[in-house]
Amino acid sequence: MPGPLDGVKVVDFTEIIAGPLAGRLLADQGADVIKVEPPWGEPWRLTQRFTPTESRTFMTYNRGKRSLPLNLTKEGAAEIIKRLIPEMDIALVNFRPDVAAKLGVDYETLSAINPRLIYCELTAYGREGPDAHRPGYDMIVQAMTGMVASETKTLDGVPSWVWSSPLIDTSAGICMAWSVCAALYARERTGVGQKIETSLLASALSLMGARFLHVESLDAETREKTIKELESKRLDGASYDEMVAVSPGSRRREHHGNLYYRVYYTKDAPIGVGCLSDPLRRRLLDTLGLTDDGMEPGWDSTTPESQAYNRALEKTAEELLASKSSAEWLEIFEDRGIPAGPVRFIEELFDDPQVVANGLVTETEHIQEGKVKMMGPMAHFRGTVPEPPQASPALGQHAAEILEWLGFTQQEIDAWRNDGVIA
């Protein structure tokens, strides 16, 4: 049985991570995704590559697609686009707002060719506002949205980005795929396509969760005071740590998460322990033979005495966890129903029984590089089951078959190849 997006056709004009991930997610569910990239290959093909046109990052975000290398700056490309777009249901774009128009793949141009087209545009900061024209990447948006400050993470005293994994790009890619599926459903009712706009900025603020929440009755006075103090600190040339100390929303507050939701070093290896509810926290205390005054009503966690108490309690817990092996503690926690797990390394996960049992690793055959193992589909459909994911395309692997499918002659294809329109 075909996948839930079988028959849906997508043209993917995107590069790097977020946009390509959106296309990959749609391909995973059965959509036919045509990746339009420059004749020399999109930048992610050429970043940390291990062959002239392949890299790990490109393979990760572009599986299941067909490659159509096309130089959009050349006149002949417009003729191909005019023939391609009427066949498409979805277009994915992640250029700066002005670039898409220069290349002739903006919404106004493409929707005039196909009014049923669903056009999803990802920008760094959104279409409006003073930063709309600026380029941006995951790490820059982390800095600009308070995410770096909220984690108070430094490297040699300098603010550092929060995750080496591109969480903003990843969440933006998921947002694009989710949005176009909703638009497909709307088009079934109305018969009309539409434009969708999203941004890295939007994804970053969504990832902030409850930290990006302003309750007027609780936060107005504190927020106004904090902004004034930050402005004053900047003028005084304060250090990053001094700036972080000013902001209640950014610094790591002294709370019991350091005892109940963290990684501990056991006698032989680190493990993660997560107790986010009151019953789980009390169960952990009982298991360790500890009491915590901070769990009782009326406790003020902001006083120096309370903070010293918390640190002492945390140290006692660390010493207790260090007295037994990781296997012993995991068995104890399993028996008590306390969430815990070992700290593993990525290399171990390809053969991990839990990962394998749930189809979260898939093996594909790349036309040039052979066997490739990578992340399997994020969701499994039990009614409309997609075909197993295919490997990322080699540069230009499908150019001829796509152009022939669009009705172009071999003579036209050869002429465009000679002119550098296609690769």
Image: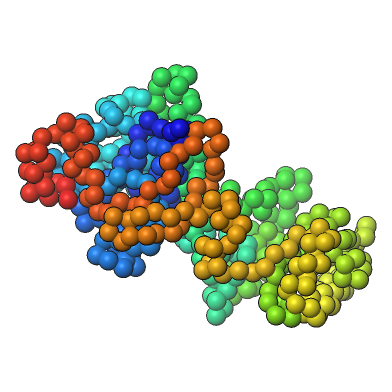
Q: Is residue 71 left or right of residue 325?
A: left
Residue 352 percent across, percent down from the top left: 58, 62
Height in image: 37 above or below 371?
A: above
Which residue is located at x 68 percent, y 74 percent? 270
Which residue is located at x 64 percent, y 69 percent? 343
Height in image: 167 above or below 312?
A: above
As rendered, which of 266 and 184 lies closer to the eye? 266
Q: Is residue 157 left or right of residue 45?
A: right
Residue 55 percent across, percent down from the top left: 34, 63
* Residue 178 in view, yes or no: yes
Height in image: 299 above or below 195?
A: below
Which residue is located at x 77 percent, y 45 percent? 217
Residue 241 percent across, percent down from the top left: 63, 73
Q: Is residue 326 left or right of residue 205?
A: right
Which residue is located at x 70 percent, y 64 percent? 341
* Residue 201 in view, yes or no: no
